[in-house]
Structures are given as C-alpha cells and as structure tokens.
Amino acid sequence: MLKSLLAALLLSLPCTLAAQSTKPATPAAAPTVAPQVLMRTTQGDITLELYPDKAPKSVANFLQYVRDGFYDGTLLHRVIPGYLVQGGLYTRELQPKRTRPAIPSEADNGLSNLRGTIAVARGADPNSGTAQFFFNLVDNRRLDFVGNQSGLTWGFAVFGKVIKGMEVLDKIAALPTRPLGPFSGDVPNPLVVIDSARVIGDEPPAASGSAKAPVKAGSIQPAARKSNKKTAAHASKG
C-alpha cells in the first residue's frame, strides 16, 4: 500500500513542478487607439482621426496646437471648390498668430492626398510646415510625394482624415469667396471660424493666448489649381 502511494506521488511530481515553473501568459497588448479631434466651426462640426503611426511628427505637432487652444478663433481662410479648404493660422481680423518652429516633412509616408484627408500646409521648403493645414475636397494625388529632388516634388504630408462632417466641408466649399485683408481672393463669405478644436477624451485646454506678432513670411499652401496642369507649392501670404 505504501509503495503504491509513493509511486502515485512520484508520478504527480513532474506535472506539479511543470505547473509551478510555467510562466503566466503575457497579456496581449492593448490596440493603439488613433487620436481623434473634434473641430467645431461656424458652419458645423468636423471630426478627425489622426495617423501617428504614419506621420508621428505631424500628428504630435497638430495635437500640441490643439491642446494649446491655438486654433480656437482662427479661420478656415482659403476655400477653392473642387480642391481644398485651408486654415489654422489667421484670426478673425486676418492677422497671423505666432507659431512654434517648423517641423520636418513626412510627405513620403505613403499616404495620399485623397478626398477627406488633412495635410500639412507648407512653403517652398518641404520642412517649413507649422500650424496651417488643409482638407482635400477631392483626390489630389498631384500633391503627393514623388521624390526629394526639390520642394516641388516633395508634396504635402497627409496626417489624418475626416471621419465625420465631410458634408460641412462641402458646405464651406460652396460658399462665395472674395478678396479680403492680405488675400487677393478665396476668402469665404461669411468668414468661417474654428470656434474650438479639442482632442476627444482630453480635458479642456487652458485659454489660448491672444494673437501675437505676425510670423515671418512663409506660411504657405498648395498652389491654386490650374485647369489641366500639374500644380506645385509656391510662396504666398495665405
């Protein structure tokens, strides 16, 4: 009887030791949630989803401006139907706000300037983007990266897309435009104001400071579209 019990105990030991030496399973990593931004404008609300995996610098830059309250009270100041809606720098008085330093271009991230995407507006230098951005109203593949030979071939860095409120941008694009302030045209009438921009899930930011001294010339955008011709970036006050 004693021998039988001892044999049973010895047979059970390997299983017991194996159970004790087995490491607990590592919990699966939680899926990364893409940040979203709610932009409230005088023409309606626009919700954005950003791509930090594809454009980390552009997304971090945009989110910092959002969290600083920088965009509150600024305009979507440039509207070209069938092309784009641009904003992110000018106050209601059409004065530019002071920005942080420019960021490196991420236009070669494989993302295309398709309808509903948001991209970094910049100057002739690919690495001159600061606070301005534009929404693509149509598929603007001619604004994509095609090479690093020059500013003309670099294209514009896409860093997110509209997931709700595209009809608001279409409504803005349908507004009449006019020359106003420093702009020779393309300013929507009435003015379209970004009342607020917030990261969904964040606490409200501290009140934004008032507009300061104008930035140096160079807050640029994609060139105005020309029929049947490829366009490129050019220097402008808008």
Image: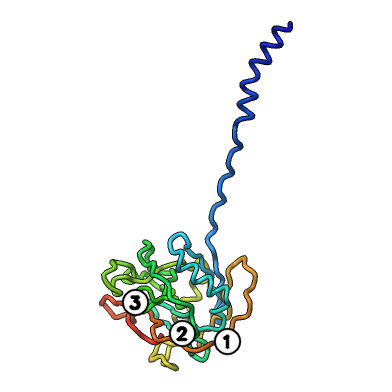
Give the answer, above or below, for where 161 lies relative to 14. below
Q: Sequence-wise, which precedes: disc 3 or disc 2?
A: 2
The image shows residue 157 at horizontal and vertical percentages of 39, 69
Q: Amino acid at mark 2?
A: His
Element at badge 2? loop
The image shows residue 203 at horizontal and vertical percentages of 65, 69
Q: Nearer the viewer, mark 2 or mark 1?
A: 1
Side of 142 relative to 84 (left or right): left
Residue 140: which quarter of the image? bottom left
Between residues 21 and 89, which one lies in front from this camera angle? 21
Between residues 77 and 190, which one lies in front from this camera angle? 77
Question: Which labelled disc corresponds to residue 125?
Answer: 3
Quadrant in which the N terminus is drawn: top right
Question: Which labelled disc corresponds to residue 77?
Answer: 2
Quadrant in which the C terminus is drawn: bottom left
Q: Sequence-wise, which precedes: disc 2 or disc 1?
A: 2
Q: Amino acid at mark 3?
A: Asp
Give the answer, above or below, for where 120 lies relative to 190. above
Element at badge 1? loop
Q: CA distance from mark 3 to mark 2?
A: 22 Å
